[in-house]
Image (spheres, rainbow, N blue to C red):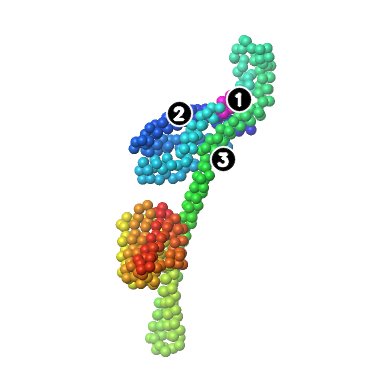
Amino acid sequence: MFSRAARGLAHLAAGLVIGPASFVWAVVTTLASGLLSFTYLGPPVFLVVTWVSRRIARLERWRAGWVLRRAIGDPYGPVTGANPWTRGRSVIREPGTWRDLAWLLVGFPVGLVTGVVGVVAGVVWVGTVLAPLWLWAVPNPRVYPVADLLFNTVGGRFALALVGLVAAWPVWWLVAAVSRVQASVAARLLEAGPRARLRQQVSALRATRLRVVDAQAAELQRIERDLHDGAQARIVAAGMTLALADRKLRASGLAEDPARADVVNARRQLDEALAELRRLVRGIYPPILTDRGLVAALTALAGDAPLTVVVDASSELGELPAAVESAAYFVVAEALANAVKHAGADECVITLRRSEVLTVAVRDDGRGGADPAGSGLDGLRRRVEALDGTMEVTSPPGGPTTVLAEFPCAS
């Protein structure tokens, strides 16, 4: 109990200093921001003011958490915007900003009441317990007889100290209680509300999911590399060994030997297995994505297509996450496959642009009528949505068909 009371007394004493200063800061800056809100200086000034206010609120969260013995997290969402004006407007719309302001205004009266009660009780108790050490130096010429006995005699001072020791537990409880009241009010206003907590949980889940997606993409790259450099190389080496064996059999005059037929059959089966393995590797993660990037991979894909394909890519795509590159590649690959198999298209245009999102559009001149809920397109949509992206298929009867996918660049 003593440690709680000591912590509470320090908390209340600090509040008597921080509370008035915070109140003055809140009043002055609120008036200044209100006057400047009619000018272009309003949002930038409010952004600076809020930066300072959030530091004060963070200190108050730490003080309240120190008393309540639990962490009180920040309730703020990310500040978005490319310039001070848009960032300032983003901060204005943040509920946590106004909860901070509410505490800066309310904290002064709450801290004054609780602080005076707690600090006075604590100081009086300490003075009572230590009465024999200091009370003799304070003259008390005009006091009641009982007080005169307690204040001006050695025995009375020790009796006063004994009374303080007996009253220790109630006083400690009172100091700790009023400190917790102040800390609870601060925590109620300064910690995240239900909506903010839900938003933080959603952000945490999104970040966790994206880490899982990135880990999955890295694992697919590893599997592709192992298959390409391991199993595929071994199959090629085995095929070469069988080819040499076939050559030796023919050189030895055993061209009609049944064993040579088995060697030729085994070599053919290895070639088929190698072709199947290469298709599998391309389906897992195309090696060209790792080696040359998304634009080069799509250009190679367009070159292999049995129709005219134009790749219109921005020169400022920059570096993209492996999961985004892979998803964009397979969106284009599926769209091209559908244009060839089902749409009867003669020409297709692939467009790539990047701003705040990566936009991939595939447009063909086929007959249209594609089913957006088909298994292939639906699987691609789920893959895109796993990266917080969107995919839209427009395919009226008679065409044209457009597949539009957008990926957040931060994915």
Q: Count the marks.
A: 3
Q: Nearer the viewer, residue 21 or 129?
A: 21
Q: Position of residue 383 (x, y in %)?
A: 45, 61
Q: Residue at x 42, y 71 (%)?
A: 279
Q: For the residues carrying marks 1 and 2, which lies nearer the camera in this image?
A: 2
Q: For the residues carrying marks 3 and 2, which lies nearer the camera in this image?
A: 2
> Does 22 appear above or below 231?
above
Q: Are marks 3 and 2 in contact (CB under 8 Å)?
A: no
Crowdedness near tag 3: few (<14), some (14–19) or many (≥20) residues, C-alpha within 10 Å: few
- Mark 2 lies on residue: 24
| Res 195 visible | yes
Decide whether residue 298 is among the magenta residues: no
The amino acid at mark 2 is Val
> Does 299 appear above or below 242?
above
Quadrant of the frame with the C terminus: bottom left
Q: Nearer the viewer, residue 85 or 18?
A: 85
- Mark 1 lies on residue: 121
Crowdedness near tag 2: few (<14), some (14–19) or many (≥20) residues, C-alpha within 10 Å: some
Q: Secondary structure at mark 3?
A: loop
User: Which sits earlier in the primary sequence, circle 1 or circle 2?
Assistant: 2
Q: Secondary structure at mark 1?
A: helix
Magenta-tinted stretch: 114-121
Q: Residue 393's mark?
A: none
> Does 89 appear above or below 145?
below
Q: Residue 70's mark?
A: 3
Q: Nearer the viewer, residue 295 or 312?
A: 312
The amino acid at mark 3 is Arg
